[in-house]
Image (tube, grey):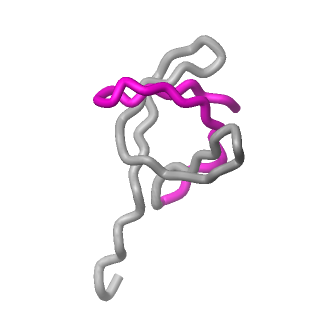
């Protein structure tokens, strides 16, 4: 599934492919196959349907968890 993703604060556009959602965040691959996780709230258009996607980096597990 391809996303055209807009980072609200940066106003940049990047076409990415949603790979999978994980407890650590959302893994994305760009057109070159580079995996990345970028913090932020995005406005995404998927096959003409607009919505929001929240991306976040993994946070270290708390000691004892």
| Span of residues in magenta | 1-23
Q: Quadrant of the C terminus?
A: bottom left
Q: Nearer the viewer, residue 6 or 52?
A: 6
Residue found at x 61% / y 11%: 48
The residue most toward the top is: 48
The quadrant in which residue 55 appears is top left
- Number of numbered tags placed on the structure image: 0
Where's residue 35, x and y in %?
A: 61, 53
Horizontal side of residue 40 vs 23, given as left or right? left
Main SS of residues in magenta: strand
Q: Quadrant of the N terminus?
A: top right
Tell me: residue 63, above or below residue 9.
below
The residue most toward the bottom is: 64
Where's residue 4, x and y in %?
A: 56, 24
Horizontal side of residue 60 vs 25, given as left or right? left
Where's residue 58, x and y in %?
A: 41, 63
Horizontal side of residue 51 vs 2, given as left or right? left
Q: Is residue 22 magenta?
A: yes
The quadrant in which residue 18 appears is top right
Q: Nearer the viewer, residue 44 or 64?
A: 44
Tell me: residue 31, above or below residue 15.
below
Residue found at x 41% / y 39%: 54
Horizontal side of residue 47 vs 60, given as left or right? right
Residue found at x 67% / y 29%: 2
Q: Nearer the viewer, residue 23 or 56?
A: 56
Residue found at x 33% / y 26%: 8
């Amino acid at each position: 599934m391809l996303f055209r993703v807009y980072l609200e604060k940066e106003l940049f556009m990047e076409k990415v492919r949603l790979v999978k959602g994980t407890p650590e965040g959302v893994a994305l691959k760009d057109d070159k196959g580079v995996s990345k996780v970028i913090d932020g709230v995005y406005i995404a258009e998927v096959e003409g349907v607009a919505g929001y996607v929240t991306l976040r980096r993994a946070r270290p597990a708390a000691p004892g968890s």
